[in-house]
Image (cartoon, grey):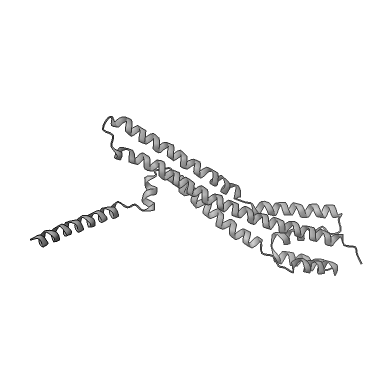
Amino acid sequence: MIATNFLQVTLNQSQALNSGSAQSVDNSLSAFDLAIKGGWVMIPLAILLVIAVYIFFERYMALRNASKTDANFMNRIKDYIHDGKIEAATNLCQSTDTPIARMIEKGINRLGRPLNDINTAVENIGNLEIAKLEKSLPTLATIAGGAPMIGFFGTVIGMVEAFYNMSHAGNNIDISLLSNGIYVAMITTVGGLVVGILAYFAYNYLVASVSRIVYKLEASTTEFMDLLNEPVS
């Protein structure tokens, strides 16, 4: 009899644990479900996230292609200019198709003019190339700063909704009345911070990549102008 009672108690406890586990599984929410509970504020945050991801990968590929340089490019340019093969130097620049090559090509096309004019022409092309490299970076910076603000805006909306429900509940305040507002407040804050942090790190990575390319452009410009300043033997 005692053994039977013991087994019955054990089975009841096991069933209770299983039902509790089932309820915990049923009550779990996916990331998508949580985002839905964040309300309409999550829509602009999702759009900003897509834009930020697109800008990062588009700029990443563009900067990677722009940073590819032939180690012997400037040496070949020097040899062509010393040998008087201006057309060959121009063709080399056109076939290379990099920011550095386009700058040097502009300088070669200005050969015969004063060195100040050549330097100015090369620097103007360099500024245009830098502007191309920095395309869309201000948008990414705006997303990095604006996404958390949109998230905090959603937080305010959620708190207003929660207090509104409390004011109409009277003395019968139930946590379920506050849950929707609290969900909006917390989830939009998290969403805004996630988008802002990702955009911030992506922006700084791209800015650092642009800075490395700008350094190469300046070094190549100096090397080219030193070549033109060499005395004719």
Residue 156 location in percent, x, y? Answer: 43, 36
Q: Outermost residue toward the front?
A: 2
Numbered circles on residues, count: 0
Horizontal relation, residue 34 to residue 107: left or right: left
Q: In the image, is residue 71 above or below residue 113?
A: below
Q: Outermost residue toward the left?
A: 1
Residue 133 location in percent, x, y? Answer: 65, 54
The residue at the point 64 percent across, 56 percent down is 209
Q: In the image, is residue 184 above or below residue 198?
A: above
The residue at the point 83 percent across, 60 percent down is 226
* Image quadrant in which you'd find residue 232: bottom right
Q: Outermost residue toward the right?
A: 233
The residue at the point 83 percent across, 52 percent down is 117
Query: Can residue 53 be seen in the rendering of this structure?
Result: yes
The residue at the point 33 percent across, 34 percent down is 165
Horizontal relation, residue 92 to residue 166: left or right: right
Query: Can residue 106 be seen in the rendering of this structure?
Result: no
Near-viewer residue (83 or 187): 187
Residue 123 location in percent, x, y? Answer: 76, 53
Residue 30 location in percent, x, y? Answer: 36, 53
Q: Quadrant of the N terminus?
A: bottom left
